[in-house]
Image: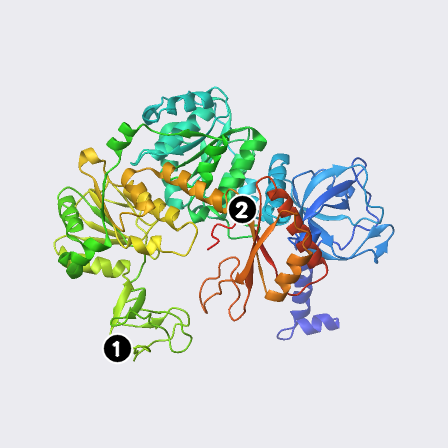
C-alpha cells in the first residue's frame, strides 16, 4: 500500500486530490485575460496599416488625431468610426522592435485608416477594438468638429455629448427593417398660418425651407410638429425634433405615433434608461428609424438623409448644455441645417431675440398666423398694477386683487384655474416687517428663508435661526418678500375652501390635470396641461420676474407668461388671464397684445445700439484675478475685440449648486466679457482656444473658464 493510499484512509485524507481537482478546474475555466501591453512581434495589417485615432482626452493642447499601428489580428474590426482602446502617454523613450510600448489604456475612436503616417517616429499599436459597431460617421464627426471650433472647445468633449455610452446588450440586438415612407399629410391645423401649407408642401417635395414659427396658443403644436415631420418623411428623408424637457417630448412622441404609426420614430430622453436609449440611438444610426424626438442630447442624433431639424422653445435654459464646451441646441441645429442643406424650423409660443435676428438677416422666414386667427385662439389678458393692489382690500386679505378674485371665481364654474408663482416653497425670502431690511443669517450673512411654516433657515449654510431680530430697527417680526407656491396654495385653499388645490413644482411636477374645477398652483415651467384648457390663469408677482438683474429678464418673463397663458382656453370660450405686474412694462404690453415677435424685434434693435448679443459675438472668461489678467494680456485677441470688465464673478453658496463659470466656494474669481463685431466670432473662439491650449500645455495650475455666447451676462 502506498503512502498516498495510507493517507486516504484517514479523516480528511482526500484533501490533496480535491485541491488538484480545483486547480485543474480553474485552469480549464475560460477566465477573461488582460490584453497584452504590446503587440510586440505581431504582424501588421497588410493594407492600410495605420489608424488615425481621436483619443478621449478633453484637454485643448491634445485636441488632435494620433496615429497607431493596426495589428493583423484587429484588421477586420478596426474600421473608421469604431471604439478602440489604445496606449497613451508613453512618450518616445520605450521603443522595442520598432514599436512604441507603455502608457496607460484610454478610449478612443478610429477616424481614418491610412497607408502611412505623417509621424516619423515609432508607432504604438492598437490595444483592442471595443466593438466593431461604427458609431462615429463622417457627418457626425464633421458636425462635432464644427461645434468644437465654434465654442472654443475640444472635439473629445463634444463627442462625449454626441455619442452615448456603449451598452453591449443593446448593441447585440439587431435593429428592425426600415418602413417605407408615409404619404404626405394633410395640412390640418397648419392652415391657421399664412404660409403653413406651403411650408409642408416644400418639405414633402424635398425642399429645405427655413422658418421661425410663432405658434398659436392651444394644444395643437405637438400635432403640427408631427405634421412637419410626416411631410419630411414622405420625401424619403429624415427629421429631428429637439424639445426642452421630457414632458414636451412625451407630447410630441404621442403626436408622432398618431400621425405616423408605431415604428417610424425614436424617442431619445434620459428617462428611457441607458440600454433603451442606446438601442434607439443605434436604430437611428443604422437607418432603421428616420425620425427622432428628444431632449438636448438628441441634437447630435445621427439621422440618415436629414431633411428637417426642429427646435421647440429655444429660450428655455435646458437647451444650453452645462458641460464643456456648453453648446446650445439652436446653434447646433443651425449648423446641421447649413452643413446638411436641410429644412429648419424654430418654434415656440414666444420669440427669442436670436430668432428675431434669423428673420431680420433673411436666413429664415417668419411663420405666423393672421391677427384674426390669433384673436380667436388667445385668451383675454388683463393687468393689475401696483397702484390697484395698494387700493384693493381683497389683495391685502387674500393676496388676490378683486379682478383676479373675480376671474378665479368665474373660471371655477367651468374648469380648472392656473396660478403661476415665481418661487417654490412657503416663504422663500424674508425681510423685516417694519423697515423692509432683508433678513440675513448671523453666521454667513446668507438670506433667511422659511421652506415650511415652522423652521427659519439660512439658504446658504443651512443653519437654523431661532431668535432673529433686525439689525437696523430691532424688530422681531418678518414679512415675505416673495411668497412661495406652497403658501399661495394654502391662502387660496382658505379663500376657496370647497375647491381642491393642486401644486406643481420642482419637487413634484404634474403632467396633466382633469377638466374639473380645481386650483392649480405652479412654478414657471412646471405647469401641467389641463384637458380642454384652463378656464382662467393668474400670473402673480410679475415684478419678481421682471426685476431680475439680467439682460434677458423681460424676454424670459414674457416667455414664461406666454407658456402659461397658452394653456388657457381661447377668448371665444371665455378664457381669461390676469397678470399682476406694472401695465406700462414692455413685456406686459406684449403679453396683452400677444405679440412676442414684435417684442423680440424691439429688443434686438436695442441690443444693436448697445452692441450686445446676438448682434455681437461675445465670450465670458472667468478665473482668479491674476490668472485672468495674464490670460487676457497674452491671448492674441482679434484687433477689434473689446474687453468689458473684469468684474467679480458670482460665487457659489456653501452647499448650493454650482453653475458653469461660478467661483468655487471660498474663492474670489473675476469675469471679463470679450466681444467682437459680427463675422469675427470664429476668430475670437480660435484665439481663446489657442491661448488656453498653450496655458494648459505649460501646466498652469490656476483654472480659466471660457464660455462662448453665455446665455446670461447679467
Dot 2: within a 10 Å radius of its alpha carbon, few (fewer than 14), some, or many (20 or more) residues?
Answer: many
Q: Position of residue 225 (x, y in %)?
A: 39, 32
Q: Are marks 2 and 1 in contact (CB under 8 Å)?
A: no
Residue closer to the observer: 606 or 673: 606
Residue beneath disc 2: 327
Secondary structure at numbered mark 1: loop
Residue beneath disc 1: 476
Q: Is residue 124 left or right of residue 591?
A: right
Does label 2 or label 1 sit earlier along the sequence?
2
Residue closer to the observer: 41 or 237: 237
Residue 683 can be seen in this image: yes
Residue 445's disc number: none
Quadrant in the picture for residue 53: top right
Q: Which residue shows up at 43% across the image and 54% down it?
A: 550
Secondary structure at numbered mark 2: loop
Q: Is residue 116 above or below residue 478?
A: above
Q: Is residue 580 left or right of residue 548?
A: left
Dot 1: within a 10 Å radius of its alpha carbon, few (fewer than 14), some, or many (20 or more) residues?
Answer: few
Q: Is residue 545 left or right of residue 116?
A: left
The span from disc 2 to disc 1 (Cα, nearest Å) is 48 Å
Residue 78 can be seen in this image: no
Q: Position of residue 453 (x, y in %)?
A: 25, 68
Q: Is residue 529 left or right of residue 680?
A: left
Residue mark closest to the camera, 2 vs 1? 1
Q: Which residue shows up at 56% across the image and 33% down it?
A: 286
Q: Which residue shows up at 38% across the image and 22% down it?
A: 197
Amino acid at each position: 500500500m502506498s503512502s498516498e493510499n495510507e493517507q486516504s484512509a484517514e479523516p480528511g485524507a482526500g484533501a490533496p486530490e480535491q485541491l488538484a481537482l480545483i486547480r485543474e478546474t480553474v485552469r480549464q475555466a475560460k477566465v477573461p485575460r488582460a490584453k497584452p501591453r504590446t503587440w510586440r512581434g505581431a504582424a501588421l495589417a497588410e493594407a492600410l496599416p495605420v489608424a488615425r485615432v481621436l483619443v478621449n482626452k478633453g484637454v485643448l493642447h491634445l485636441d488632435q488625431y494620433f496615429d497607431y499601428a493596426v495589428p493583423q489580428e484587429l484588421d477586420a474590426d478596426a474600421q473608421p468610426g469604431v471604439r478602440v482602446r489604445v496606449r497613451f502617454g508613453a512618450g518616445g523613450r520605450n521603443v522595442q522592435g520598432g514599436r512604441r510600448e507603455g502608457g496607460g489604456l484610454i478610449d478612443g475612436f478610429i477616424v481614418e485608416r491610412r497607408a502611412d503616417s505623417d509621424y516619423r517616429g515609432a508607432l504604438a499599436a492598437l490595444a483592442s477594438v471595443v466593438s466593431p459597431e461604427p458609431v462615429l460617421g463622417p457627418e457626425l464627426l464633421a458636425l462635432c468638429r464644427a461645434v468644437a471650433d465654434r465654442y472654443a472647445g475640444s472635439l473629445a468633449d463634444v463627442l462625449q455629448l454626441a455619442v452615448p455610452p456603449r451598452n453591449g446588450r443593446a448593441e447585440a440586438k439587431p435593429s428592425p427593417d426600415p418602413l417605407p415612407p408615409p404619404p404626405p399629410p394633410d395640412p390640418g391645423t397648419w392652415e391657421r398660418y399664412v404660409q403653413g401649407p406651403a411650408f409642408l408642401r416644400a418639405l414633402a417635395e424635398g425642399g429645405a425651407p427655413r422658418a421661425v414659427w410663432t405658434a398659436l396658443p392651444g394644444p395643437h403644436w405637438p400635432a403640427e410638429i408631427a405634421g412637419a415631420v410626416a411631410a419630411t418623411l414622405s420625401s424619403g428623408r429624415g427629421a429631428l425634433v429637439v424639445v426642452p424637457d421630457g414632458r414636451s417630448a412625451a407630447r410630441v412622441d404621442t403626436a408622432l405615433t398618431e400621425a405616423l404609426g408605431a415604428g417610424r420614430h425614436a424617442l431619445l430622453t434620459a428617462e428611457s434608461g441607458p440600454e433603451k436609449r442606446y438601442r434607439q440611438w443605434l436604430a437611428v444610426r443604422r437607418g432603421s428609424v428616420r425620425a427622432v424626438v428628444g431632449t438636448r442630447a438628441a441634437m447630435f442624433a445621427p439621422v440618415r438623409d436629414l431633411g428637417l431639424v426642429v427646435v421647440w422653445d429655444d429660450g428655455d435654459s435646458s437647451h444650453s448644455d452645462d458641460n464643456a464646451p456648453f453648446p446650445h441646441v439652436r446653434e447646433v441645429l443651425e449648423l446641421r441645417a447649413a452643413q446638411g442643406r436641410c429644412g429648419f424650423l424654430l418654434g415656440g409660443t414666444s420669440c427669442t431675440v436670436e430668432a428675431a435676428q434669423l428673420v431680420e438677416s433673411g436666413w429664415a422666414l417668419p411663420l405666423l398666423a393672421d391677427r384674426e386667427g390669433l384673436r380667436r385662439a388667445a385668451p383675454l389678458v388683463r393687468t393689475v398694477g401696483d397702484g390697484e393692489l395698494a387700493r384693493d382690500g381683497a389683495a391685502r386679505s387674500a393676496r388676490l386683487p378683486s379682478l383676479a378674485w373675480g376671474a378665479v371665481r368665474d373660471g371655477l364654474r367651468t374648469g380648472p384655474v392656473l396660478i403661476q408663482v415665481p418661487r417654490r416653497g412657503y416663504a422663500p425670502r424674508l425681510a423685516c416687517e417694519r423697515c423692509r431690511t432683508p433678513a440675513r443669517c448671523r453666521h454667513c450673512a446668507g438670506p433667511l428663508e422659511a421652506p415650511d411654516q415652522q423652521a427659519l433657515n439660512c439658504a446658504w449654510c443651512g443653519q437654523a435661526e431661532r431668535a432673529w431680530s433686525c439689525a437696523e430697527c430691532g424688530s422681531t417680526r418678518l414679512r415675505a418678500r416673495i411668497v412661495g407656491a406652497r403658501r399661495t396654495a394654502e391662502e387660496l385653499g382658505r379663500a376657496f375652501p370647497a375647491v381642491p388645490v393642486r401644486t406643481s413644482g420642482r419637487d413634484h411636477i404634474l403632467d396633466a390635470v382633469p377638466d374639473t374645477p380645481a386650483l392649480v398652483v405652479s412654478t414657471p415651467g412646471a405647469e401641467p396641461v389641463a384637458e380642454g384648457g384652463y378656464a382662467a390663469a393668474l400670473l402673480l408677482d410679475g415684478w419678481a420676474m421682471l426685476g431680475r438683474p439680467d439682460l434677458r429678464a423681460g424676454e424670459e418673463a414674457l416667455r414664461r407668461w406666454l407658456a402659461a397663458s397658452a394653456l388657457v382656453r381661447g377668448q371665444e370660450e371665455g378664457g381669461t388671464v390676469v397678470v399682476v405686474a406694472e401695465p406700462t412694462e414692455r413685456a406686459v404690453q406684449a403679453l396683452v397684445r400677444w405679440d412676442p415677435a414684435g417684442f423680440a424685434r424691439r429688443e434686438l434693435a436695442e441690443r444693436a445700439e448697445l452692441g450686445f448679443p446676438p448682434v455681437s459675438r461675445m465670450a465670458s472668461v472667468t478665473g482668479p484675478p491674476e490668472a485672468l489678467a495674464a490670460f487676457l494680456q497674452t491671448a492674441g485677441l482679434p484687433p477689434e475685440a473689446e474687453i468689458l470688465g473684469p468684474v467679480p464673478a458670482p460665487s457659489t453658496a456653501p452647499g448650493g449648486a454650482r453653475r458653469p463659470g461660478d467661483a468655487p466656494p471660498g474663492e474670489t474669481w473675476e469675469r471679463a466679457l470679450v466681444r467682437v463685431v459680427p463675422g469675427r466670432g470664429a476668430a475670437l473662439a480660435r484665439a481663446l482656444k489657442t491661448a488656453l491650449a498653450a496655458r494648459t500645455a505649460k501646466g498652469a495650475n490656476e483654472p480659466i473658464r471660457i464660455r462662448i455666447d453665455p446665455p446670461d451676462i447679467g
